[in-house]
Image: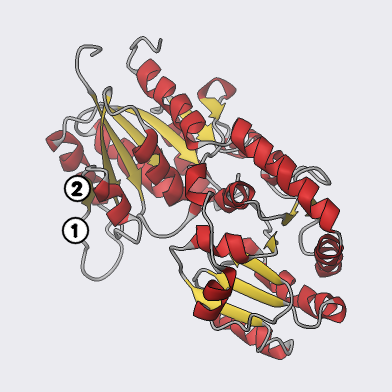
């Protein structure tokens, strides 16, 4: 095995805009191509990050869509793709890819399996936890993206501790070392350059992200900063509901819904503050992006967030589902320039030392090699 390249396939739902998908892209970008032949398998659709992966010369496969609903035999198609590409190691991301990748492998190449669990609300649906528990018997390792996630894998899914490791997410910080003409970017977004401070959120519009609590915090924030703007980049099932909440709170002129965006590094450069009001998380990629971009952070203390956002050191933390505390933290940080600069400096230092894509990928490479009994030195 050590004399030839290892055929590695990353299995995910899609390459749509999202934190999990960024992990896949960052592994593709930073993995040792002298040791690994990398490919990606999308079980659903392809998505916005497809061109970025294809530019790296990495093959991307997708399953033919089944007419009329869920394809309960998708693992048969996975098995064929694994066999046709002589895959040695499969790296799966979240439950359905774990299931399809494992069953497909058992029916074909019997590849080594490394599985990563991203942000989930534990205890999850029973069928998901049972599926992951059963699939873990066939995995070399099951990875949590934070110590919190790893602990929940053992507590709720009863995966043995010897099978679990923690590998924290990482990103390519160079993408955020850019200069942006603030006035031009604001004009592009239709925002008056004379507006007040700009709060930013770049997330999927789902229950997990707790955006309704931020919208309910906005009137209190406006009492201190009447011209404040909230810019929400992202899309999802709750968009219409959140737009209605915004209207009911009298925020129609203060909140801007952008939809899905690929210019997140530029947006982070024009935000005065990044706010993450999530109800649960693993280790959110957007927090790492804000740290790399030098955007000060207010976030809820859930999941692995506190690993990156250390209260009063690299950001401010509040309890989830508490609009008043969220508003107080936002206004406090907007009013204190010295505090903002200190948090930004500390956050950048922590990011550089702990959360680069290279650090993350090197840890995954070690597991891929160890699973095959290959020397890692």
Residue under the image location 83 percent in, 61 percent down:
329
Pick whichever, 74 or 314, lies toward us.
Answer: 314
Residue 9, by quadrant, is top left
Q: How many residues crowd mark 2 within 10 Å: few (<14), some (14–19), many (20+)? A: some
Q: Nearer the viewer, residue 28 or 73?
A: 28
Residue at x 46%, y 67% (from the top left corner): 261
Residue at figure coordinates x 81%, y 46% from the top left? 311
Q: Nearer the viewer, residue 160 or 90?
A: 90
Location of residue 367 with respect to 65 vertically, above or below: above
38 left or right of 128 in image: left
Q: Quadrant of the N terminus?
A: top left
Residue 347, placed above or below residue 318: above
Residue 77: assigned label? 2
**Where's the C terminus, which quadrant?**
top left
Location of residue 21 in the rendering, given as x and y in whole percent from the top left corner: 42, 50
Quick one: SS at disc 2? Answer: helix
Left or right of 296? Residue 114 is left
Q: Residues within 10 Å of mark 1 (few under 14, many from 20)?
A: few
Residue 374's spot in the image, x, y percent?
A: 33, 12
Per the rendering, the mark at residue 188 is: none
Residue 174 screen position, x and y as percent: 49, 44
Q: Which residue is mark 1?
A: 64
- Identify the secondary structure beneath mark 1: loop
**Extreme left residue here?**
84
Residue 220, compared with residue 145, is above or below; it is: below
Give the percent coordinates (x, y) of residue 17.
43, 60
In the image: residue 185, left or right of residue 314: left
Q: Is residue 139 left or right of residue 332?
A: left
Viewer can see residue 152: no
Q: CA distance from mark 2 to mark 1?
A: 8 Å
């Amino acid at each position: 095995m050590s004399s030839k390249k290892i055929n590695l396939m990353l299995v995910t739902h899609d390459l749509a805009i999202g934190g999990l998908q960024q992990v896949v892209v960052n592994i593709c970008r930073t993995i040792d191509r002298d040791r690994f032949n990398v490919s990606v398998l999308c079980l659903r659709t392809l998505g916005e990050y497809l061109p970025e992966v294809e530019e790296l010369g990495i093959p991307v496969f997708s399953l033919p869509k089944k007419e009329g609903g869920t394809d309960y035999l998708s693992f048969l198609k996975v098995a064929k793709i694994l066999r046709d590409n002589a895959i040695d190691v499969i790296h799966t991301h979240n439950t359905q890819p774990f299931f399809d990748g494992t069953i497909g492998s058992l029916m074909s190449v019997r590849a080594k399996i490394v599985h990563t669990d991203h942000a989930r609300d534990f205890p999850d649906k029973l069928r998901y936890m049972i599926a992951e528990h059963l699939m873990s018997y066939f995995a070399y390792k099951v990875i949590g993206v934070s110590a919190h996630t790893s602990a929940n894998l053992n507590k709720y899914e009863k995966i043995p501790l010897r099978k679990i490791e923690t590998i924290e997410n990482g990103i390519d910080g160079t993408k955020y070392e850019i200069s942006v003409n603030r006035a031009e970017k604001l004009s592009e977004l239709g925002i008056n350059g004379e507006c007040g401070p700009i709060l930013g959120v770049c997330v999927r519009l789902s229950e997990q992200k707790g955006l309704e609590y931020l919208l309910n915090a906005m009137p209190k924030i406006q009492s201190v900063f009447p011209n404040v703007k909230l810019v929400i980049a992202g899309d999802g099932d709750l968009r219409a509901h959140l737009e209605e909440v915004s209207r009911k709170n009298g925020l129609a002129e203060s909140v801007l819904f952008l939809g899905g965006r690929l210019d997140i590094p530029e947006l982070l450069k024009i935000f005065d503050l990044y706010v993450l009001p999530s109800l649960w998380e693993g280790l959110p990629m957007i927090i790492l992006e804000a740290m790399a971009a030098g955007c000060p952070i207010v976030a809820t203390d859930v999941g692995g967030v506190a690993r990156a956002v250390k209260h009063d050191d690299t950001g401010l933390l509040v309890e989830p589902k508490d609009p008043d505390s969220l508003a107080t933290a936002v206004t406090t940080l907007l009013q204190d320039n010295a505090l903002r600069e200190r948090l930004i400096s500390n956050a950048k230092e922590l990011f550089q030392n702990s959360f680069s894509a290279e650090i993350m990928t090197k840890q995954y490479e070690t597991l891929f090699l160890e699973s095959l009994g290959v020397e890692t030195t």
